[in-house]
Every structure is written in structure tokens, then in C-alpha cells.
Image: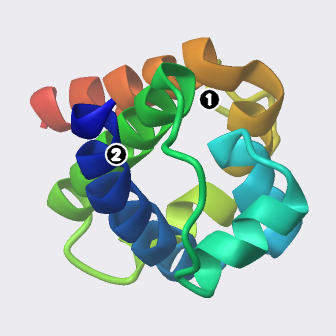
């Protein structure tokens, strides 16, 4: 319990920062994190909320890994624009990575993270 509470603080700080960098709407942020809109709004105001579930912590871990990978891949603002841009890569089918990850949940988030790492590795 205590571990998850501590991890939650760190995870939420990271996710709020990521949501800002990616320019996500509140509904997008809530959907990616796997919480209700009202819970997301409390999180943004830094009000105390329930510790995140293992599922939600996994989401944050995958998304922050993608965030870091994008910043290693792109030296400019493209790192933060990339999730919002329609992408014709096989994982995305001309949708925005954000939408693909909302629809595909954790499995897709992990795939996107691996995809970014693979692109980086092939440079």
C-alpha cells in the first residue's frame, strides 16, 4: 500500500507534466491514464486521490518511456508534437498516436514505446 502511494505521487507528477507537453485535452489525459474526468481534474489540482492501480502505474510507465524516447529521438519541439500528428506507421493507421494509445490501451502503449526505441536504435 505504502509503496503504491509513494509511486503514485511520482507517477502523477510525471504524467501531469507529460500531458502538458503533449498538449492533451482533459478527456484525452483521463482516457490515457485510465481515470474518470473528475478524478483527472482533481489530480491536476494536486488534490489527494486514491493511489493509482497497478494498471494505471503501468500506463504512466509506458507513456513516460515514450516521452523520454521521443526527446532522445528529436532534438526539437517535434518530440512533443509527435503524439498529436497523424502517423501512417503500422501501429497508427493514419491516426494520431494519442488516439491509437487511448483505443489500444496498455498493449498499444507498450508497442508505441518499443516502436520509438526501435526507431532510435536504427539511427
Judge from the rendering whether residue 6 lies leftward or rightward of residue 93; answer left or right. left
Q: Secondary structure at mark 2?
A: helix
Residue 19, horizontal then vertical, whole percent: 56, 70
The residue depicted at 39 percent of the width and 83 percent of the height is 77
Mark 2 and mark 1 residues within 8 Å of each other at the beta carbon:
no
Number of numbered discs: 2
What residue appears at the point 13 percent right and 37 percent down from the top-left corner? 123
Residue at left 80%, top 44%?
A: 99
Mark 2 or 1 closer to N-term?
A: 2
In the rendered view, tell whether residue 21 sits above or below residue 52: below
Q: Residues within 10 Å of mark 1 (few under 14, many from 20)?
A: few
Residue 27: x, y in percent? Answer: 87, 63
Specify the quadrant that holds the N terminus. Answer: top left
Q: Quadrant of residue 116?
A: top left
Q: Which residue is mark 2?
A: 5
Asked if 55 appears above or below 75 in the picture, the reply is above
Task: Name the mark on residue 89.
Answer: 1
> Residue 41, can we see it?
yes
Q: Position of residue 80 (x, y in %)?
A: 45, 72
Amino acid at each position: 500500500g505504502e509503496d503504491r502511494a509513494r509511486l503514485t505521487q511520482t507517477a502523477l507528477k510525471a504524467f501531469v507534466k507529460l500531458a502538458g507537453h503533449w498538449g492533451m485535452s482533459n478527456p484525452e489525459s483521463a482516457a490515457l491514464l485510465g481515470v474518470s474526468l473528475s478524478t483527472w481534474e482533481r489530480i491536476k489540482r494536486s488534490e489527494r486521490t486514491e493511489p493509482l492501480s497497478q494498471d494505471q502505474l503501468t500506463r504512466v510507465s509506458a507513456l513516460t518511456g515514450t516521452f523520454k524516447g521521443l526527446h532522445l529521438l528529436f532534438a526539437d519541439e517535434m518530440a512533443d508534437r509527435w503524439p498529436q500528428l497523424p502517423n501512417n506507421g503500422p501501429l497508427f493507421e493514419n491516426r494520431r498516436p494519442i488516439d491509437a494509445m487511448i483505443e489500444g490501451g496498455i498493449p498499444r502503449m507498450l508497442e508505441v514505446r518499443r516502436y520509438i526505441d526501435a526507431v532510435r536504435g536504427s539511427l
